[in-house]
Image: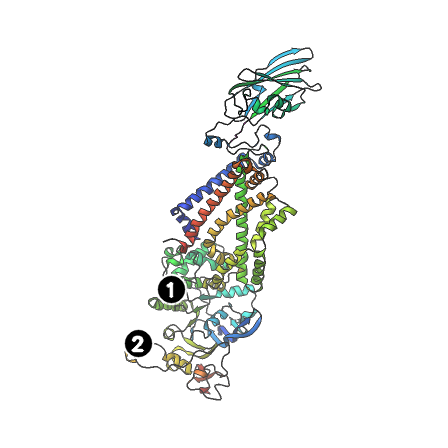
Amino acid sequence: MRPLLDGLRRMGRYPSALVGLAIIFALVGTAVFTVVTIPYGQALELWRGGDVWRMHPVNARPAWVDRIAGSNLPRTIVVSSDDAVIEEEPFVGGNRLRIPLEFDFDYDGFPSELNLFLTSSHTEREPFVRLTWETPDGRELNLGGRRPAREERVSISQDWELERRLGRVPHVGLFAAEPEGDGPPEVIGGRYRLVVDAITFEADARVDADLVVYGRVHGLAGTDHQRRDLMVALLWGIPVALAFGLLAAVGTTVTTLVIAAAGVWYGGWVDAVIQRLTEVNIILPMLPILVMVGTLYSTSIWVMLGVVIALGIFSAGIKMYRAMLLPIRESPYIEAAKAYGAGNARIILRYMIPRILPVLIPTFVTLIPTFVFLEASLALLGLGDPVLPTWGKVMNDAQTQSALYHGFYYWVLSPAALLMLTGLGFAMLGFALDRIFNPRLRTM
Amino acid sequence: MSAPARDIRRSAAGPVLSARDLHTWFELRQWGFLRVGSVRAVDGVNFELQAGEAVAFVGESGCGKSSLARTLLGLHQPTRGEVIFEGRSLGTLDARERKTYLARVGFVQQDPYGALPPFMDVRRILHEPLIVHGVRNRAEREKRAREALEEVRLSPPDDFLSKFPHMLSGGQQQRVVIARALILRPAMIIADEPVSMLDASVRVEILQLLRSIQTNHGLTLAFITHDLSTVRHFAERIFVMYAGRIVEQAPVNELLNHPQHPYTQALLGAISDPDPDNALQMREVPPGEPPSLLKPPAGCRFHPRCNRMIPGTCDQEDPPEFEPRNGHHTACWLYR
């Protein structure tokens, strides 16, 4: 094991090894952080989407895009009735409530959507609610009245009546100055107010309101078409990718190595069978088989991992290891081991395999990202794990939602950048290790 | 060095190791299954080794002496005949007994660097045979490793235990190989050209070391070499091999002074002579090359090269063993 330790010590002299290690450690650290802060179950729940994300904008860019572009696009504003000063006026058999929802809006752009979530605690008779919109320049708009259910979502943006009245989609029209001519609408900055006048018809019934003014940028990663924060997938993609890559690389390398060594050691029909199996397996196309398994059987990442390892056992690696092990089988120290009675398993595992381990480690390290990419490719083809958030699935969503056509570059670029970073980290380390352990490649 | 207490010399007379009609043939195949012939590396060898004696097998390269060594060790299966160790034929041993046999016979190879796994340190190299033979106690293994190193005069052992083979000189490597062969306390050591890859300066040291270990422990030493000049001091009996057979055997002085077989005579004539007067003298060297072991010549294997060949006999019939002088056996029709 000494050459291994020596080699690892020598890594300090290769900047690329250090950079690669730094990237890998950063990824591993982030992965651990992710798994601790967003536990597996929670991640799956978040990625399933739905109501959890109702306060998030659709397809918002990452906040740093805004910073780089020098613009000041709206963030998401949530105004809750819990923070508002509510006027109450009880009457016989009911209550009159006035909930003013106030917020400051000082951005260059219009919000992407406007929703009001009403919660009413009535038991039988719905309350009556009337909405009034007050702009900073003193206009008042009646947004109509309604009788909300216990949980009511008032989609102000999709109020066609209002849109007709304003001449623009409501989340633009409500924030714009009176239209003058054909020019583009201009945002009016300042304090807006949505007054919710509610009349309840039960003595202790209450009405709560949450106004959400959806922004156009969100967080570090932006959001997708289902309002999900992409950060969840980008973060959870790290442990999934690393685990898949590492397990697949370990699984294939170890089994391939042991099988190749056993074939070389026993020779004869054992070797012949292994070689023929390998030759057949090498010409079988891996991706179509995986697509077939994914389509017909299961797209679970563990099933895919198993298939990848199974197909990787009798891979071209067997030929390479065999070529390296054949001269070792004939070496005198193996003969000496036989002469003092070492058994077959001991000779294979303790005498033959350690001899080629140093050569193998760089190959192993560079093998990890190829499996990471394979997993991403499968997800991109729509064969990703149905429940896990992964980078490939983010890109798959982006593709099906025509992200590039709509200009949502971040949706494709951030998972792609992470994939490239992973590849880069392992490649830099692997190439440095290759130079250390295979000194013939070392430059003068 | 004091003689250790253990004495494996058997009181009962009888050979430690003997070979009876031993044949080791390697099948040649075409396309993996068609038999096209056999290389007759060992082709009918008989001998007996007594406890505590040192013998040398001498011959040209390709005469089958290394194959013989490997057959004796059980690394090759004999095609015919048997190897008998301490009264039992190797072919009848079960796996467990075979392992015990391997512990009783040490093996020293030609290439000391190749014979040591490069990724293990000396400690591990010496522990390995003990681990294989079930010495579980680490302290016990360590003690025996140190003893073995002392025995091959690599002392203090601490200087060597944590070294890797590439950090040692050729002579030191060969000493480690010998220590490994000794660590299981064998009754016999088979040394296959133990010094041919070493510098001339350390050859004698290694041979003396082997010899002193052999006498101190009363080991049987089978010493395989192509170099007749070194055997004089390190063996008591000599077997001369030619084309897979033993053609002559005798005690060392008897053989060197009165070689009987024409091949032995030729071999002795080929020894480099330190006398400068002889430098320019042409020697009588047998013409031709050793025969193909795939198709050995009929009759005596040496007859195509022999200058005293008897036509009609030597090229027809295999010579049996004759005893032209007391204790001196040779397979040659000249002594009929």
| View extreme (left): residue | B277
For the point 58% across and 64% down, the residue is A269
Q: Which residues are magenta?
A: A215-223
In this image, A28 relative to B253: left or right?
right
| View extreme (right): residue | A124
Q: Nearer the viewer, residue A383 or A239?
A: A383
Q: Nearer the viewer, residue A395 or B286?
A: A395
Looking at the rendered structure, the kind of residue marked 2 is Pro
Image coordinates for residue B245, horizontal then vertical, percent: 48, 78
Write down the residue under mark 2: B274
The chain under label 2 reads B
Indicate whether A296 appears above or below B135: above
Q: Secondary structure at mark 2?
A: loop
Q: Is-magenta flag for residue A221?
A: yes
Image coordinates for residue A361, horizontal then vertical, percent: 47, 51
Marks 1 and 2 sit apart, C-alpha to C-alpha, by: 36 Å
Write down the residue under mark 1: B2
Image coordinates for residue B117, horizontal then vertical, percent: 44, 59
Indicate whether A205 appears above or below B102: above
Residue A102 bears which disc, if any? none
Q: Secondary structure at mark 1?
A: loop
Query: In the rendered image, which quarter contains the C terminus of chain A?
Result: bottom left
**Is residue A297 in sight in this rendering?**
no
For the point 48% across and 69% down, the residue is B70
Q: Main SS type for the magenta part?
A: loop
Looking at the rendered structure, the kind of residue marked 1 is Ser
The chain under label 1 reads B
